[in-house]
Amino acid sequence: MLASRSGFSPEALAVAKTYGIDTFTLEELDEAALKERLSPSSSLWLKSVRVTPTKVTVTTGLDDGLMPDLVTTFPDNLLYKHDGSELGSLRQLVELLLAADYPRQHLTENATDEHKFFELEWTPPAQGTPGALFMKKLEPTMLRLVTKIRMVGPCSVEIGRFDLRHGRIGNVEVSWGKAIVEGKDAMAVATRDSTGKKILSINFKGPASDASAA
C-alpha cells in the first residue's frame, strides 16, 4: 500500500496498478466535513493511573473459634486451598486484583491528579465455597481463612492531551496526534470507516524526546 498527502501522478498510479499496489491519498477534511463526520473536539485526553502497593494486610479467622488476626504480610507469603495445597504467593494475588476490570475502571473514572495514595480492600469467597483462601499459622500449625485483604500505597495520575489533526484516506476518516504520557512519546490514531466502525490505537515509544517535550 502506498499513501500520499499530495496525491499521485498518472505515471505512479499506472505503475502501482501494474504491480497490484493500492494507493491512498490523505486528504484534509474541510470544516463542514469535520462537523458532519467527526466529534467537534479537536483533542483526545488519556488518563493513566499508576499504583504501587507498599503495604498489604490480611485479616484471618472467624472460622476456627479463635480471635481474628490482622497480619502484616510479605510478597512471598503463600496462600492455600482448603485442603492445604499451595495456591500461589500473595504477590501474585495482589497483581491479579489490581489488574482486574473493576479496580481499573474505578481508578480511571474517579482518580484525579490530587490523589497521592490509594486503598483497595477485597473480601475473598467465604469458607466452603469455591475460591476460599487460607494462610498458614505456624504456632499452632493450622490453616486460617482469609476474610479480607487490604492494599495501600502511593499512586500517580497523569492526563495526556493529544492535539488531533484530521484527514481522510479513501472513505476512511483518520484523526491522529502526539502527546507525552508517563514520560514516553505516544501516538494516537483513530479511524472511522464508511460503516461507522471506530478504531482507536495508541502506540508508546521510549522516553520522550526533546522535540516532543517542547
Image: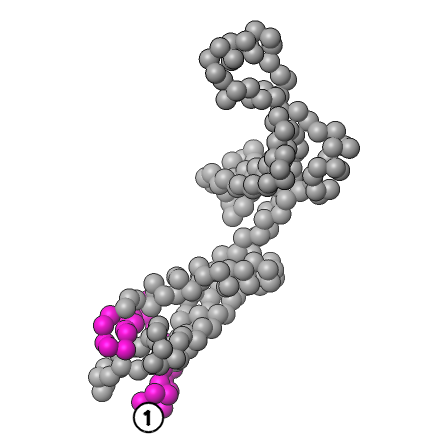
Q: Quadrant of the C terminus?
A: top right
**Observer-nearest of 170 and 47:** 170
Q: Is residue 174 left or right of residue 84?
A: right
Residue under the image location 74 percent in, 37 percent down: 36
**Observer-nearest of 34 and 148:** 34
Magenta stretch: includes residue 69: yes
Q: Is residue 180 above or below residue 23?
A: below
Q: Which residue is mark 1?
A: 65
Kindly identify the amino acid type of the residue bearing the numbered disc 1: Gly
Query: The magenta stretch spans which residues?
Result: 60-86
Q: Residue 153 appears at what percent x and percent y?
A: 46, 66
Residue under the image location 22 percent in, 84 percent down: 141
Tag 1 secondary structure: loop
Magenta stretch: includes residue 46: no
Q: Is residue 99 above or below residue 37?
A: below
Considering the whole magenta stretch, tell me its main secondary structure.
loop
Most distant residue in the bottom direction? 65
